Amino acid sequence: MGIFDFELWWLVIIPIAFIFGWYSSKYEKNNNSADNRLIPEAYLNSFNSLIQNRKSDAIKELEQVIDSDLFTVDLQNILGNLYRDSGNIEKSIFIRNNLLNRVDLTREKRNSIKFELAKDYFESGLLDKSKILLEEINSELIQIQVIQLLIHLSEQTKSWDDCLKYTEKVIAIDEKNDYENIYRNYHCEIAEIYLKNKEFEKFNKYLKIISGKFGFFPRIKILKFQYFIEIKDINKISEAWFDLISNNENYIDALIKELSNFLSESPSNFSHAFFKESLQKQPSLTLIKSIFENFDLLKNKDHKIELIDNIFEHLKNIEKIDIEIIFYFMKNIDLIDNVMFLKFIENNCHKNKLIGGFEKKYKCGVCGYNSSNIYWQCISCKSWESFL
């Protein structure tokens, strides 16, 4: 569920708000009975529409109540939520601002309306206005929700120092939720900035702080791998590479992208030795495809031929073979012994080892979002490390 999705507790709040308005509002005794019947009917219809998830109908029915004295602060706030949920942010903002102009609001009610208005501004992209309102709110009842929204807002603007500040605040007061995952990733975002700016001394100091707090989790290992590439430490690159792919072969695609520029600047014999050792230690279909995708890094024809022979050998021990591998072989057919290639096709077809080509997909473990790339933060639900 997103930050602003419709929540079922509205179905509890609406009747309470309505009943309060019904008994607290002053009616003239000579109101005709038809008018008295109209308002409850409109209200009950809106309630029914919400149950059936017909939000546009609920809005129309609640708008029928708006002209009556029964339209309390709570009902107006709920109508604002329905407007926002239906994408009509301007009307939602208009309602909240009108409510805040009232002088009879209690402090908690005013804080509640400010919070909803801050969410309106957040969704409409007015992040500065949203932040100003959130920082004005002083309420123990919604303190955690306010800080959580400030965290989301800071993520949007990539203000990682603010993310850390607000996360530390919420950790101190919220014992129900675990914030370690997002907390350590905010630290990593800052470390990554140091690395990109080639501020290696700051980067290393910060990495020590992170590892001291959280240990050596996957992202910090990849940051170190990127650092070793920057300083061109060949031994450390190999060590970090094998450590990462031995734990999760899904890292191969991401790491190869980091490596490609470094390998292109290295002697061809280094790339050959690197790929050959990788095949020996961690053979997999993902690795073989990544090698083929970077085959042009090998300038020496004999190195290519030797590596293809190694690939043929390792494919014997792989249970299923993506038919895309055949395409890569065909692309380099001038380097392959034709008899050996035909035997390979025949044997694998006979053993039903060939499977149809597929696009590599990574899936968010929280919302199910599919992507051809690994993300540290899901671009759909904003969860951290959910692709690993």
Image (cartoon, rainbow, N blue to C red):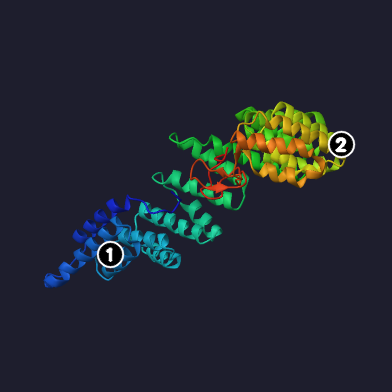
Instruction: Look at the numbered disc 2 and give the secondary structure of its residue.
Output: helix
Q: Residue at x 31, y 65 (%)?
A: 57
* Nearer to us in this view, 266 or 325: 325
Kind of residue indicated by mark 2: Asp
Relative vertical location of residue 212 with respect to residue 37 in this rendering, above or below: above
- Residue position marked by numbered label 2 in the rendering: 302
Q: Nearer the viewer, mark 2 or mark 1?
A: 2
154 w.r.t. 347: above or below: below
**Dot 2, how many residues are within 10 Å of its Cα: few (below 14), some (14-19), or many (20+)?**
few
Name the residue located 76 percent from the left edge and 31 percent from the top edge: 310
* Residue 232 in view, yes or no: no
The mark that comes first in sequence, 2 or 1, is: 1
Q: How many marks?
A: 2
Residue 102 point in image, percent of width and height: 36, 64
Task: Identify whether 57 is placed above or below 189.
Answer: below
Mark 1, residue position: 71
Q: Quadrant of residue 93?
A: bottom left
C-beta proximity under 8 Å, tags 2 and 1 = no
Q: Identify the element where label 1 is drawn.
A: loop
